[in-house]
Structures are given as C-alpha cells and as structure tokens.
Image (cartoon, rainbow, N blue to C red):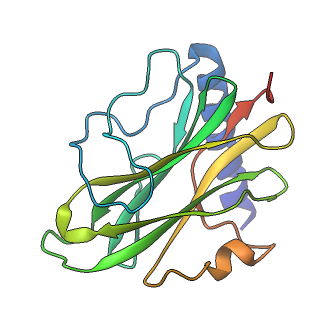
Amino acid sequence: MALFNDVFGIRTMAVDVYCRVVDECAGGKGRPSGEGADTPSAAPGNPKPGTPTACRGRDNLLIEGALVNPCIRREGDSLEIYVDVEPGSPDDPNEVVVWAWWRDAENAKGEPHKCLIKLGDGYQRCGPFAENPPRAGYYSAATIVTSSGEVPAKWADKNSTGQVSARIYWPGKQ
C-alpha cells in the first residue's frame, strides 16, 4: 500500500507541477458532442487556451456500464466540474445517473449534481457546473454512477471520495 501511495503522490505532484508551469492540463479534448443529460450540458471541445483543466486522464473507469472521466477547471473566478461519459459497450440501451461534485484535500465535498445519461446515445458530457468552494486550495472533481436518482452513499460517506480527477489549485473567489 505504501508503494501505491508513493507512486500516486508522485504522479499527482508531477501533474500539479506541469499544470502550474504551462498553466494548462489535458482533458476532454477532441471528443464528439452528444445530448441526453437532464441537467446542464455543453458540447465538449478543447478547453480554452490557458484555462487550467485537470481530468482523471486516459484511465476512464467503468461504473454501471459507463466509462467516466471527471474533470475540473478554473473558469473566471469560479471552478467548473464536469464528467465525460461514454458507454462501456457500443449498444448499451441503459440509462444511468452520473453524479459530480468537487472535493478538497481534506475530502470536504460540494453539493452533488446529477445528469441522466442514455448510454445508447454515445459520448456525452455531464455539466459543466460552476462552483465556488469556501476557500482557496487544491480541488478535484469527483464522480459516481448509479442506476437510481437517490444521492449516492459514496457522496454521503465522509471517508469515501468517489472516482476523482487530478487536482487543480483554485485561488479562491476574487
């Protein structure tokens, strides 16, 4: 377990340093747009040049038949969180509920947002959702996928994080 923590900590630190040096991180680039969320969604595309963005990366997680990639970025003096969602299999007809929230280094969490995603519609984005956490610090986007609209236990559990993006520094509301 210590080796995993050491490697994960180094990977996270390297991503944070890269983000601060070039003021930009990869995530959600070049994907086709989709529809189907019952809450705000946006046509995916490249982040604005110079907009720091942190996503989970290439290792999307399969949860309830959906491949998810949570992302967080600075937008003006707010943070935006969103989740890129793809079906785990091409002809999956199921509907799932994708939940997204921010979390900080101490695992304090923002209120969860949800999107109803029809996996058969292909790639979709849940969000973006504008957020203003209470203080400056490092934040990640977190997600979980459920088959119901009930607030997920992973969000309510103080010790659970959900599936998280890389961290990004937010200087606080200016």
- Rendering coords of residue 27 (x, y %): 43, 37
Using the image as rendered, state which of residue 27 and residue 40 is in the foreground. Answer: 40
Expressed as whole percent of the image width and height from the top left, the position of residue 45 reads 32, 33
Examine the image and state in which quarter residue 93 appears.
Answer: bottom left
Residue 21's quadrant in the figure? top right
Q: Tell me, yes or no, if residue 88 can be seen here.
A: no
Instruction: State the residue at coordinates (66%, 25%).
Output: 17
Q: Is residue 135 above or below residue 148?
A: above
**For this view, does 62 lie left or right of residue 141?**
left
Task: Tell whether 16 sits left or right of 32.
Answer: right
Tell me where residue 90 sits by quadrant. bottom left
What residue appears at the point 21 percent right and 42 percent down from the top-left corner? 32
Q: In the rendered image of this protein, does residue 21 appear above or below residue 140?
A: above
**Whole-percent x, y for residue 136 in the image:** 84, 34
Give residue 149's position: percent from left, percent from top. 50, 80
Viewer-nearest residue: 122 or 88: 122
Viewer-side residue, 132 vs 26: 132
